[in-house]
Image: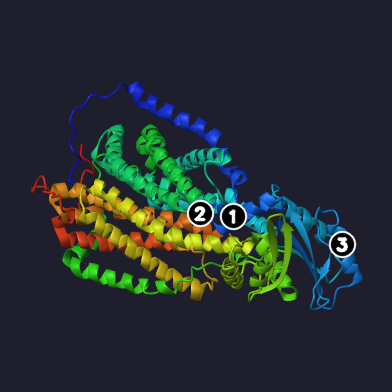
């Protein structure tokens, strides 16, 4: 505890009128801008694209086939499949019903009965390119869903129906996700600050950040500068809320410290702002650079997420260093009502973190060695992670018609019915290509000459989104590529899925090293050290490996997930390493500040004591906001929600609280190598549970 308030040098103050006028004008400007930009959060779905075929690079074989089909004048329609089933056998009334209800849709195929039995039939209805699949499928489902004969099951499936169901699942982003995230943050802030006003101000800052980010992303996506999909949209919302709250917590916590040492609230705010601008900016810069590394991805969806997430973090930073200080300047100590920090009052004792610091000071080497061993134990399960890809139907965590319809279709027809794999080859070699294409897993072939090129449709035995189907396409490509002079290429829905999985795996190997190098450079500049950044990165990478190992156990054995997309480990790495480094930045910048006064060993213990509460609160907020992604019934988002939430808590409670302080304490001043930090004064009290004035005045 501090014995008394710090003495302040006499400084010239700005005119009293300007002291409130400038913050008031800044707050007013944000209020006006928020009113304009806020509605764009609800408009992002209008410019989002969830078609996986659009995410592949131009060099992908499936993309080349799609372009060749366009040149040949073939249809680019997305098939929807109406499937009927009656286990006792279809009746004439059933067939008449299906024929009449689908007759009004252009291009609908004739009713085709199941070849093995009389229990099912199907009608393929193309949804034309340029038409929103959700609208086309909704009209089709409405037409066939009314007045069906008793006992007849009628479902709409196929790629168009899957796209429509995916769009509907993402429909909760605009309202439900924001509501859940905002409520979680509000509850945590009320618990932390025991104030009704401060949580409102912090949430208002986050809302303005979201409005700014949404407006920017909307304009860029609308002008085709970046690609936006439902996943990126959900992550944007969560990142903005989480980051804006984290940065606000750091500023507000330092402001509360300064208010106890400084009589004038404006002076206290300036000191807090100056003391936190470096770690907040460095933290935001680290995350921005980390997510921008996704621009090196070959997948357009990943490339789009990079700038989308960077824009969100930048918006959170901007509101934290402009709007929030301005509104705090207007409210002063009232911001913390009813528990206002009085000038000269004792600082929070930090008993919990003081005890942790004392524990570390007694046995730092034992603590970091034991912590590393525990983390390695969790990381040992990482090789069991199933991230080679999942069936498209497995992305839904709740029952949807497209999945149920595909199951019915697969029981009675070849699995690839209605979603054929497409082979384009030179017409002269087309017979040889067709012969080579009769590989295991292909049930039927149909050739359509179109001049110099021939289009061959291959119906697969397995459902088009299954792992068995992708294996068949792999065999098919090997076979037709071997036909000399045919220049054969294989595309279609299953090939698109296969190319996406392979591109994701390639991106992971490329982007992860780039992220590590970028973060090392930021930390080296911030901490003026080479050894400290290496150690911090090593701890966060170990934390990531542990998180993925524990996640593997949860996904495989507790939640029984079918697997994961190859992009899940990549996204988990980018977010966990970038966000995990945040808490180390918050800690180590304070440790460096305190080390200049009392030396590295005592500075580490003091830094842990002073930042323990706020960093823990920030970690809990970010973990809770990412957990909100789980309210959307999408496998990918549920997995990212768990990975990031668990990983952030692991970083906050174990890595930042035990491993990093123990390493820094054990190494002492050597951690800043090649630089050296010598304490300015040896007379300053060195107890780790005491509090400094909090800034260099």
Labels 3 & 2 near each other (Cβ < 8 A) = no
Mark 3 highlights which residue?
Answer: 99
Foreground residue among 407 and 171:
407
The disc label shown at residue 586, or none: none
Q: Give the quadrant of residue 88.
A: bottom right
- Mark 1 vs mark 3: in front: 1
Residue of label 1: 64
Q: Give the residue drawn at x 41%, y 70%.
A: 550
Classify 10 Å Cα crowding around label 1: few (below 14), some (14-19), many (20 and above): some
Give the CA distance from mark 3 to mark 2. 41 Å
Q: Quadrant of residue 17?
A: top left
**For the residue labelled by badge 3, is the local secondary structure a helix, a strand or a loop?**
helix
| Residue placed under numbered mark 2 in the picture | 299
Q: Position of residue 589 (x, y in %)?
A: 25, 48
Specify which label sits upstream in the sequence, 3 or 2: 3
Q: Could you say whether the residue bearing mark 2 is in a helix, strand or loop? A: loop
């Amino acid at each position: 505890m501090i014995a008394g308030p710090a003495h302040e040098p006499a400084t010239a103050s700005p005119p009293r009128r300007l002291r409130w006028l400038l913050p008031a004008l800044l707050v007013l400007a944000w209020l006006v801008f928020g009113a304009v930009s806020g509605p764009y959060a609800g408009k992002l779905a209008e410019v989002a694209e969830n078609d996986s075929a659009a995410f592949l690079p131009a060099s992908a074989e499936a993309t080349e086939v799609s372009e060749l089909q366009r040149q040949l004048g073939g249809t680019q329609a997305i098939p929807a499949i109406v499937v009927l089933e009656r286990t006792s056998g279809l009746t004439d009334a059933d067939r008449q019903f299906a024929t009449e209800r689908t007759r009004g849709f252009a291009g609908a195929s004739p009713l085709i009965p199941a070849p093995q039995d009389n229990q099912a039939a199907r009608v393929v209805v193309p949804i034309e390119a340029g038409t929103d699949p959700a609208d086309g499928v909704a009209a089709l489902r409405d037409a066939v869903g009314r007045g069906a004969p008793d006992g007849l099951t009628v479902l709409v499936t196929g790629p168009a129906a899957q796209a429509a169901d995916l769009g509907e699942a993402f429909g909760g982003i605009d309202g439900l996700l924001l509501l859940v995230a905002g409520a979680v943050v509000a509850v945590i802030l009320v618990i932390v600050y025991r104030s009704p006003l401060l949580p409102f101000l912090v949430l208002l800052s986050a809302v303005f950040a979201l409005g700014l980010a949404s407006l920017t992303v909307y304009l860029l996506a609308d002008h085709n500068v970046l690609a936006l999909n439902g996943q990126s949209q959900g992550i944007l919302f969560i990142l903005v809320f989480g980051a804006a709250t984290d940065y606000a917590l750091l500023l507000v916590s330092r402001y509360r410290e300064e208010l106890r040492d400084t009589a004038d609230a404006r002076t206290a705010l300036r000191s807090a702002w100056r003391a936190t601008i470096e770690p907040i900016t460095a933290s935001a810069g680290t995350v921005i650079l980390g997510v921008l590394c996704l621009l090196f991805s070959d997948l357009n969806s990943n490339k789009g997420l990079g700038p989308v997430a960077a824009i969100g973090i930048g918006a959170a930073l901007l509101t934290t260093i402009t709007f929030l200080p301005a509104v705090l300047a207007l409210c002063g100590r009232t911001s913390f009502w009813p528990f206002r920090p009085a000038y000269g009052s004792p600082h929070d004792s930090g008993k919990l973190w003081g005890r942790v610091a004392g524990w570390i000071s007694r046995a730092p080497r034992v603590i970091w060695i034991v912590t590393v061993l525990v983390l390695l134990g969790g990381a040992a399960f990482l090789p069991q992670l199933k991230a080679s890809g999942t069936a498209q139907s497995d992305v839904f965590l709740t029952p949807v018609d497209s999945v149920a319809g595909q199951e019915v279709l697969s029981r009675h027809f070849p699995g690839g019915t209605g979603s054929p794999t497409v082979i384009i080859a030179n017409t002269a070699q087309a017979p040889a290509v067709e012969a080579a294409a009769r590989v295991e897993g292909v049930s039927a072939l149909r050739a359509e000459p179109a001049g110099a090129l021939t289009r061959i449709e291959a119906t697969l035995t397995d459902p088009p989104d299954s792992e068995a189907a992708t294996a068949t396409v792999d065999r098919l490509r090997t076979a037709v590529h071997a036909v000399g002079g045919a220049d054969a290429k294989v595309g279609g829905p299953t090939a698109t899925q296969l190319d996406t999985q392979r591109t994701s795996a390639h991106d992971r190997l490329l982007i992860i090293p780039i992220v590590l190098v970028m973060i090392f450079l930021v930390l080296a500049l911030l901490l003026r050290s080479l050894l400290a950044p290496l150690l911090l990165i090593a701890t966060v990478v170990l934390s990531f490996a542990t998180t993925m190992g524990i996640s593997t156990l949860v996904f495989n054995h507790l939640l029984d997930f079918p697997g994961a997309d190859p992009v899940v480990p990549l996204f988990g790495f980018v977010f966990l390493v970038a966000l995990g480094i945040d808490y180390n930045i918050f800690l180590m910048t304070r440790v460096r500040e305190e080390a200049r006064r009392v030396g590295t060993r005592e500075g580490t213990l003091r830094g842990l004591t002073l930042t323990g509460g706020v960093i823990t609160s920030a970690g809990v907020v970010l973990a809770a906001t990412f957990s909100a992604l789980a309210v959307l019934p999408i496998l990918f988002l549920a997995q990212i929600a768990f990975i990031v939430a668990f990983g952030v808590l692991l970083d906050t409670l174990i890595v930042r609280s035990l491993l990093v302080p123990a390493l820094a304490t054990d190494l002492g001043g050597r951690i800043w190598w090649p630089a050296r930090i010598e304490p300015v004064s040896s007379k300053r009290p060195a107890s780790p549970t005491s509090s400094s004035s909090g800034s260099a005045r």
